[in-house]
Amino acid sequence: MTIRKGCCPTTGGGGSITDHFAPKYLVGNVLAGDPAVGSGPPFRYIPDPGDGSGIATALAQPDGPGDIWIRPGTYTLAAALPAVPAGVLVRGSGRGTTIIIGLSAGDQGIFALSAGSGLHDMTVQSPAPTGATAGSTAMISCTDSVSLERLTLEMNPSAGSTLLDAVYMTGGAGPPPGSNATDILIRVGGDGTVPGRGLHMQGVQPNPSPFLFARNIEIYGVGGLSTGCWIEDAVFVCSQLLIFEYTDTGLAWTTPSGNGGGSLRVDEGAMQTSVGNALTVGVAIQGSGHVLRSLAIACNNTTGGIGMRLTGPDQSSINAIEIDDCLITGFADGIVGGENGITTTSFGSNTISDCLVFAASRGIWLSGPSVTGNQIVDNQIGVSDLVSPPPIGGIIIDDDPQGGASSNTLKGNIVNVNGGGSAAVHGIRCASQLSVIEGNIVRLNGGGYCISLEDGAERTTVTGNVCTSDGDSLGCIYQAAAANPVVRCVVNGNSCTSNYSVDPVAGIPAAIVLEGRASVASNNTIFTGTPSGDSPGITLTATTNNSNVVGNVCEGSASLAVNDLGALNNVSNNIGV
């Protein structure tokens, strides 16, 4: 279109300039009282009788791209809409004001967004199917570099429906500039026979992974939400993420390709469900390079489930993950990482800090020989009810097969565990060599030991911990012999309190029990409470040899501070009070 403007010449004396404004289309709703007759360019009004035909006309205009504005009203589609062209913004008049209702049979996809397009300010609904469906598996499907803002999306996947996702996003052919989503409310209903997902991002080789930067995303299950967000080999960065009433997984980041293309960062969010089951997982993460901060993850189901799972797929690496300031409650296991049934080539340099974890069986559980160089610091952990088979405890690092897990740090944690009378339940159980257990406060009631160094924990340092064992727990600190004695460990400067309702037999159990060899126990302060008021504070079993036990103060052990049943040990300068 050419505009004559004598007052604004391009070369002097008059002339013409080109109109660089993109065409604008206004779609009105005749049923809501808008005019039934259209008007022509440059800004075009298109009437819609309420069946979406006016919207389809606007999307199909040959002189685009251009923004499309949709007036208030309900538009119940009579046919599938054309794709939103590249660079076109489709804008309604507000959520609950402009309402688009999709088909109940046939293709239930509603908007397909091309690169650079957008969808703003409306409610989009997909009804339960009333006939055969085919075609799209998502209400809103898009490639990368789209804009989604101020939307309410309602989906009802039911028997016979092909719909799985409220929003599906995949990468384009070129370098992705990234998409954004702001103020999105997703409700997933249905009859529960079809596993519905709120947001599904998928990187598909050889295209680059899609990027999505999101804020204030709310996803609610109303009977049909299986997974809130399912991210496959993609980049998802989100602040303020809320996911409620999911059955399987709240948030999942997976790498089916195994190449770990993409990453996850979520700051501030909540995931809660009352419809979980024994396999429910709050957050499931694979791959490396993720950050999770300030998440509240809750489940009203203590018969199973995992709050946060950092495992798989087989033969993958899980490294450089930061979990900080999270609350996890109501699951059998709080945070689980490492192998647990699959082979992980590397699980290292991960940090779990400042989290509050309440679980039925295990607070934090890392398993496998690949568990190396991780930090578990400044967390508060509570474990009770005990619904799973061993191992059970507050913090557990397993090494199976023995020999690989190493160099892990457990520092500044507060651990409270109800052992339920089982000697297999420990506050902290470590089977990792060259590790540091320092400055933790551990309380165990009716279990094994506050801190147990298991097979594989050689050359580990246990220092500056405050341990209290009650309810006839076995004791405070234990160094195992088993098939491969734990060797060259340092147990130093700990404060241990053990209370027993009966006197130990032959000095076992005791507050500190060493069964390994070539180790040091020094400068520990021990109180042992027994009916007789006189029981050893430290016991060296018959397998203990070449160890140095010096400078310990054992209250409640007036006759024998250290009971040495081993050989070639140096036991000196210990005080029984």
Image (spheres, rainbow, N blue to C red):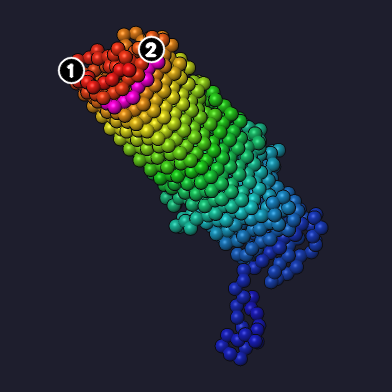
Tell me if residue 327 comes above or below residue 169 in the rendering. above
Tell me if residue 357 comes above or below residue 78 in the rendering. above
Residue 510 appears in the picture as rendered: no
**Spot occupied by residue 431 in the image (x, y as percentages of width and height):** 33, 26
Question: Along the horizontal axis of the image, is 170 left or right of 532?
Answer: right
Question: Along the horizontal axis of the image, is 515 left or right of 4?
Answer: left
Kind of residue at badge 2: Gly
**Spot occupied by residue 542 in the image (x, y as percentages of width and height):** 24, 13
Q: Residues within 10 Å of mark 1 (few under 14, many from 20)?
A: few
Residue displayed at 61% across by 30% down: 274
Residue displayed at 32% across by 11% down: 507
Tag 2's secondary structure? loop
Instruction: Provide the residue designation for mark 2.
Output: 533
User: What secondary structure is the magenta-colored segment mainly?
Assistant: strand
Where, quadrant-wise, is the C terminus in this rendering? top left
**Spot occupied by residue 150 in the image (x, y as percentages of width and height):** 64, 53
Residue 33 appears in the picture as rendered: yes
Kind of residue at badge 1: Leu
Residue found farthest to the bottom:
13
The boundaries of the magenta stretch are: 522-530
Residue found farthest to the right:
33
Q: Earlier in the sequence, mark 1 or mark 2?
A: 2
Disc ID at residue 528 = none
The answer to which of 130 and 174 lies nearer the viewer is 174
The answer to which of 335 and 521 lies nearer the viewer is 521
**Spot occupied by residue 524 in the image (x, y as percentages of width and height):** 31, 25
Instruction: Provide the residue designation for mark 1.
Output: 568
Q: Quadrant of residue 560?
A: top left
Question: Along the horizontal axis of the image, is 192 left or right of 492?
Answer: right
The answer to which of 189 and 149 lies nearer the viewer is 149
The answer to which of 490 and 55 lies nearer the viewer is 490
